[in-house]
Image: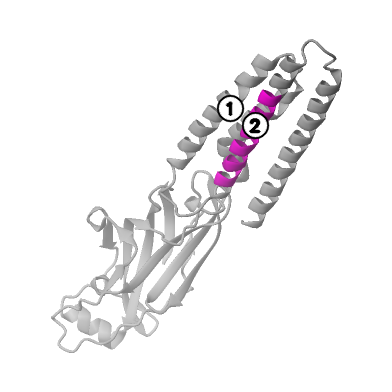
Amino acid sequence: MDVDNVYGFSSRDKTYTVEGTLQVTAPETEMGQWLAAGIDPISLLRFQNMVQPWNSAVEPTSSAIRAGSNLGKNYRFNGSFYSDEIDYRSYPFGALPLTLHLAPDPSFPTAIADPPAIRLEAIQEGSGVSKRTNMNGYKLASWRLYNETEGVRMELTYQPIGWAALVKWLMPLAITMTVMLLTPNLRSSFSSERLAIPPVVLLTLVFMQQAYRDSLPSLPYLTVLDGLYAFSYLATLIFFCEFIWCANVMDRYATGNTAPMQRRAERLEVLLQLASLGGYAVLLVWAWAQR
């Protein structure tokens, strides 16, 4: 198997389109019998993870050829495939495994009176992956063609391009939370301005998370990015509560000496800022470990 191009990856549907070539060979006796009966060898196989087979193509590119002591035929295929191995727990980081799973077709043609049991075997020699298989936002890290119980599998492992994921998903979140974490630096006398910022930040976080979630399927688990958003919600809510408490205290002691209370509030806000930064550091280390 030789993969020429991979494109059209949908993170929401876990589907992608693959173009490539395939050589099917078999012992001369069996292959000769199939060809004499008018059976195309590719009809004895199927891509188990192909979706929309009506919108795919598998066409022969040669007549019978000799490969050592075997006979075979070459084919070109183009179709949409699905990978159930994709796990988004470390999204937007982590490996992206795309597979092609080829297995014997159990519906053997009736033209063969005594059909043999077909066992597929991967041939590494001549197999490969073109450089054009890099996708937008991802680069090919490795590939392998190997045997398994139910047939042969080609696995392409992609890694996200770090800067692309950073700019698309993490930078907007980082900028929004930087504004939130700098808000306590406003003097407590600007209580109305301080109280106005957390609700705006919360709404911004909701819209950004919804936009990113719309690009993924419904998941029974949280991704790394979900963890960052959840912590951001919590940090914003804590700061909002602290701003309310500070505004009430300053209003209560408006006629007296408020300097001690201001220093106390400032120390508390500095601790909250440091705790927030520490929390993000822990989450990023955890995210890196999930790759």
Q: Quadrant of the C terminus?
A: bottom right
Q: Position of residue 16 (x, y in %)?
A: 39, 52
Q: Residue at x 41, y 61 (%)?
A: 84
Please identify the residue farthest to the top as the structure is shown. Answer: 255
Q: Which residue is mark 1?
A: 201
Q: Is residue 201 left or right of residue 33?
A: right
Q: Residue at x 16, y 75 (%)?
A: 38
Bounds of the magenta span?
A: 226-245
Taking 176 as reference, is 86 above or below it? Answer: below
Give residue 248's mark: none
Taking 211 as reference, is 221 above or below it? Answer: below
Q: Is residue 247 left or right of residue 159?
A: right
Q: Position of residue 140 (x, y in %)?
A: 54, 55
Q: Residue at x 82, y 13 (%)?
A: 256
Q: Which residue is mark 2?
A: 177
Q: Secondary structure at mark 1?
A: helix
Q: Secondary structure at mark 2?
A: helix
Q: Quadrant of residue 172?
A: top right
Kindly identify the amino acid type of the residue bearing the numbered disc 2: Met
